[in-house]
Image: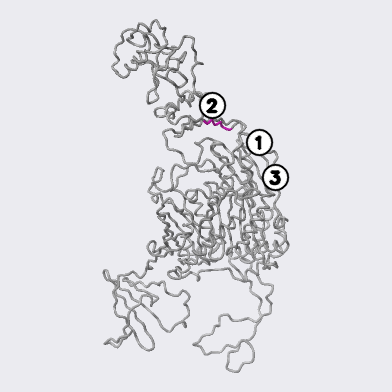
């Protein structure tokens, strides 16, 4: 609505988004968010808009000046306390399984390109997306960096470390980083080279709602709201299976009874990533679980799209830089015929060197010498590319033909083609894409892969066990040009891996697999140091694959460590770790339930591009080049009938359930073939404990007797370790005692001492030839059994009155004593006098009071009673024997019961004590 000012200007109210530029109080002109990025032509508009922002104390006055052909408009001052540079806070609720999550943006991290806070129950995830102002050097790898951190303050705790703050990224945090990165990367547009960083923090954790799937969804929302160009909205969910019911985003309590732990990420129409483990789940059940998860992801994605339309930022599409389209044609012309020959080389190293040499040749031609296309002719008419149509010029340009006098005359002129030069980066990117295209074409058109296999073929397999004599178990598994050396080490509870996470700091893993990938495995030179994110992820996948077949702690009380060192690699090294680790476990004598094998599946999606029928082509046991050039990397591990672990990464826009079903069935056939080859292992696994493995003896005593084993400040258990030479003695509140020893003799000694310490003595028991260990003013301490002592009061040493104990006995003397009392603390009171001849007992001397009425009364009471006859011996005393379980070579078979890798240590005064 317009009003006329006295000066003749039209006045209208000001609207914040009506202008593309703003002028601050410092008179600095800045480009606002609603300025079109692609407006470069001077013809695009005949008008110009300018807004001036002058701040004054708390409020600001804004003016909008608009010039037009018909008149001028100047806005009246409008007072506002809002900050126009920041987006308005938005909060929406999105379905997340059987509940809703709260998504908030504009509250925190307003300077980031995208930032969201996602709340599920009382678990809160904050995720931000930022990108560099200046693009980095072009490469074939999107410059994306993901970091995820669990703040201990989220659970009301502090770090257990010395510095009391979060340090380097923990293994389980690395796994979540990978879960965020893998589904997002295929959706990011190629040619965008601004370094992008996604930061995710757990700010609050209620112990009930998992933060990992929530973090994947939060990252997908933050990227969708940011300026980063992406093709699809990503969300992640967890699917559990309790009984026959699938549960979307189950709680931690529900997951305790679940047979499946599936984390799925995707878009509204495709699956981009799945990862998880299960207890021998069938392929059909897994497909059903994926279907349930995909439906949940689709519902979340649709809600996020509505949020993006409401408050999303415009994408930086103008910054995308792709190689020149003609460069693809030039590379094919130069290297096409040679590429066909190189890709037929079966061995990896010769093929890699040939490709490198060919790439160098193409690079020299296109970036240094210059290249003239075969289609270009020598005698062409020279054109003038600099002559462009200008609306302000009336001069007519005639390129050829009849012209009138006075017009511009341009004589046709032939010239030679100018060699074209391209940047080195573009040539390298295009050469890699062309190589992938030729490899895919060879597979689809020829039906054969680089090594001559068909699509469902498995590479040759060989394996051997026991190659390391001092290791507890070892195996070398070779599949084609991929090789894994797996080594098993057995130990006690002290060797278990401690886990410090949001849930607790007393959680331990008694089984863990560590994967290492040295650069020598691919014939290269590289850095050696802390494990990479890839190594941590591959190791965890192999660990989860083998975990369901392990025996329980009661059946096999060892801590198990598996090391998988990749000595050769040409694809599927993580699945080689599964096969080698299974053989090494058998060689170490671990009674596993069955054998486990793994296989990696690949895919060529668009087969119609190479003359196929359009049906995706599934590849079994893919090599490194097929992994890099293919569209899928699907790893599946299990036995003949079920799956124990799986991981799938998609490098295109996603796959559908029918494709996944076909891949799972083909993977099942591949696993069966590999398991059959593993049975041919030569030499085979020993299936018995190594003579170098430690022995573990399990005893069960009454819980109240644990303190007798530990002693004051752990002195007793330390003395037992030093005396017998065992490695460690572990005690728990429930009365479980574990003795770890290197040899049987030391194990038997410590077992005898603990048995005597924890025996339940009965009043009236007689002990013969017991040694006096020490003398005190009030009596002597007598060892009735190894490690078990009792007090014989001075009044119970003799029938006559004694001034001091040394009058009748000394340290080292052997005496016979009778148990006359066991107090509430389990302390023993003994009597020598009760076993003396009756003649002395009939005329007892007058005893002086000891000063302790309780002891005096007890002593006088014990004088009345008939001792056992002289001929009685120690065999007359019935000593209870504890039921014990000893693990010796060979190991006992395991029972088919569920195995839990993570056991919580029970808080007790009994702690593991080592002699070292």
Q: Which mark is residue 91?
A: none
Q: Are marks 2 and 3 in contact (CB under 8 Å)?
A: no
The spot of residue 407 in percent (x, y) is: 58, 92
Vertical position of residue 388 compared to residue 430: above or below: below
Task: Give the secondary structure at mark 2.
Answer: helix
For residue 130, which quarter of the picture? Answer: bottom left
Q: In this view, does 406 lie to the left or right of 18?
A: right
Assess whether residue 697 is covered by the magenta stretch: yes
Q: Mark 2 points at which residue?
A: 747
Task: Give the secondary structure at mark 1.
Answer: loop
The spot of residue 865 in percent (x, y) is: 39, 13
The boundaries of the magenta stretch are 693-698
Q: Which callout, 2 or 3, points at the residue further toward the start of the chain?
A: 3
Q: Mark 3 points at which residue?
A: 462
Q: Is residue 277 left or right of residue 89?
A: right
Q: Name the residue under label 1.
A: 686
- Number of disc labels: 3
Dot 1 crowding, Cα within 10 Å, few <14, some 14–19, many 20+: some
Whole-angstrom CA distance, mark 1 to mark 3, is: 17 Å
The spot of residue 442 in percent (x, y) is: 70, 62
Dot 2 crowding, Cα within 10 Å, few <14, some 14–19, many 20+: many
At horizontal 63% and vertical 34% (from top left) the residue drawn is 688
The spot of residue 341 in percent (x, y) is: 72, 60
From the image, state whether disc 1 or disc 3 is nearer to you: 1
Q: Is the magenta stretch mostly helix, strand or loop?
A: strand
Vertical position of residue 892 compared to residue 286: above or below: above
């Amino acid at each position: 609505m317009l009003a006329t000012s006295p000066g003749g200007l039209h006045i209208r109210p000001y609207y914040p988004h009506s202008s593309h530029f703003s002028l601050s109080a410092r008179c600095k002109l800045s480009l606002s968010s609603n300025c079109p990025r692609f407006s470069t032509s001077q013809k695009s508009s005949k008008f110009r808009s300018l807004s001036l922002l002058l701040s004054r104390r708390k409020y600001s006055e804004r003016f909008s000046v608009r010039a037009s052909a018909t008149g001028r408009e100047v806005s009246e001052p409008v007072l506002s306390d809002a900050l126009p540079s920041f987006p308005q806070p938005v909060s929406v609720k999105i379905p997340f399984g059987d509940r809703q999550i709260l998504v908030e943006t504009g509250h925190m991290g307003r300077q980031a390109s995208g930032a969201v806070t996602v709340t599920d129950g009382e678990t809160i995830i904050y995720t931000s997306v930022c990108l560099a102002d200046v693009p980095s050097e072009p490469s074939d790898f999107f410059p994306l960096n993901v970091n995820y951190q669990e703040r201990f303050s989220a659970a009301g705790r502090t770090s257990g470390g010395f510095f009391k703050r979060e340090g380097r990224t923990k293994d389980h945090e690395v796994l979540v980083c990978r879960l965020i990165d893998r589904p997002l990367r295929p959706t990011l547009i190629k040619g965008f080279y601004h370094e992008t960083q996604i930061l995710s923090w757990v700010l609050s954790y209620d112990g009930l709602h998992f933060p990992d799937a929530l973090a994947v969804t939060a990252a997908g929302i933050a990227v969708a709201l940011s300026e980063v160009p992406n093709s699809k909205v990503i969300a992640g969910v967890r699917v559990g299976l309790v009984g026959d019911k699938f549960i979307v985003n189950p709680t931690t309590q529900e997951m305790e009874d679940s047979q499946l732990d599936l984390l799925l990420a995707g878009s509204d129409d495709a699956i981009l990533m799945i990862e998880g483990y299960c207890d021998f789940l069938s392929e059909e059940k897994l497909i059903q679980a994926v279907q349930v998860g995909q439906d949940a992801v689709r519902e979340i994605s649709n809600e996020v799209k509505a949020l993006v339309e409401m408050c999303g930022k415009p994408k930086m599409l103008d910054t995308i830089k792709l190689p020149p389209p003609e460069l693809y044609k030039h590379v094919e012309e130069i290297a096409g015929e040679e590429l066909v020959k190189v890709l037929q080389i079966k061995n990896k190293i010769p093929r890699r060197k040939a490709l490198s040499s060919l790439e160098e040749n193409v690079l020299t031609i296109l970036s240094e010498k210059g290249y003239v296309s075969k289609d270009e002719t020598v005698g062409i008419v020279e054109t003038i590319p600099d002559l462009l149509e200008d609306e302000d010029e009336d001069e007519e340009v005639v390129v050829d033909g009849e012209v009138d006098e006075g017009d511009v005359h341009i004589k046709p002129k032939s010239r030679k083609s100018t060699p074209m030069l391209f940047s080195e980066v573009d040539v390298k990117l295009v050469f890699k894409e062309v190589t992938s295209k030729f490899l895919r074409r060879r597979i689809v058109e020829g039906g054969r892969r680089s090594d001559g296999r068909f699509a469902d073929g498995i590479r040759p397999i060989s394996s051997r066990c026991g190659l390391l004599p001092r290791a507890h178990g070892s195996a070398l598994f070779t599949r084609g040009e991929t090789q894994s050396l797996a080594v098993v080490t057995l130990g006690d509870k002290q060797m278990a891996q401690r886990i410090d996470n949001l849930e607790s700091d007393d959680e331990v893993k008694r089984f863990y697999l560590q994967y290492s990938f040295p650069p020598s495995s691919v014939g290269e030179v590289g850095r050696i140091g802390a494990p990479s994110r890839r190594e941590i992820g591959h190791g965890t996948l192999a660990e989860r694959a083998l975990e369901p077949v392990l025996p329980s702690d009661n059946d096999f009380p060892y801590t198990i460590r598996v090391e998988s060192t990749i000595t050769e690699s040409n694809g599927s090294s993580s699945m080689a770790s599964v096969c080698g680790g299974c053989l090494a476990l058998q060689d170490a004598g671990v009674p596993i339930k069955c054998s486990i094998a793994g296989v990696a599946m690949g895919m060529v999606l668009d087969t119609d591009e190479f003359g196929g029928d359009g049906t995706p082509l599934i590849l079994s046991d893919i090599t490194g080049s097929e992994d890099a050039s293919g569209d899928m990397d699907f790893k599946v591990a299990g036995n003949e009938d079920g799956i124990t672990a799986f991981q799938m990464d998609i490098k295109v826009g996603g796959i559908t359930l029918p494709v996944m079903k076909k891949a799972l069935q083909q993977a099942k056939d591949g696993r069966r073939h590999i398991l059959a080859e593993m049975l041919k292992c030569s030499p085979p696994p020993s299936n018995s404990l190594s003579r170098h493995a430690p022995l573990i003896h399990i005893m069960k005593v009454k819980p109240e007797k644990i303190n007798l084993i530990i002693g004051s400040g752990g002195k007793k258990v330390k003395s037992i370790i030093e005396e017998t030479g065992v490695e460690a003695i572990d005690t728990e509140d429930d009365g479980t005692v574990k003795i770890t020893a290197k040899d049987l003799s030391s194990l038997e000694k410590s077992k005898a001492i603990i048995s005597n310490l924890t025996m339940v003595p009965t009043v009236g028991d007689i002990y013969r030839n017991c040694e006096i260990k020490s003398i005190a003013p009030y009596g002597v301490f007598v060892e009735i059994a190894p490690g078990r002592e009792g007090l014989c009061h001075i009044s119970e040493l003799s029938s006559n009155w004694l001034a001091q104990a040394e009058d009748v006995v000394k340290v080292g003397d052997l005496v016979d004593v009778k148990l006359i009392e066991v107090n509430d603390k389990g302390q023993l009171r003994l009597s020598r006098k009760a076993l003396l001849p009756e003649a002395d007992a009939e005329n007892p001397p007058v005893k002086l009071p000891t000063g302790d009425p309780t002891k005096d009364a007890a002593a006088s009471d014990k004088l009345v009673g008939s001792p056992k006859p002289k001929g009685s011996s120690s065999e007359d005393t019935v000593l209870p024997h504890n039921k014990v379980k000893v693990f010796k070579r060979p190991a006992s078979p395991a029972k088919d019961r569920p195995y839990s890798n993570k056991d919580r240590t029970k808080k007790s005064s009994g702690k593991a004590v080592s002699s070292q």
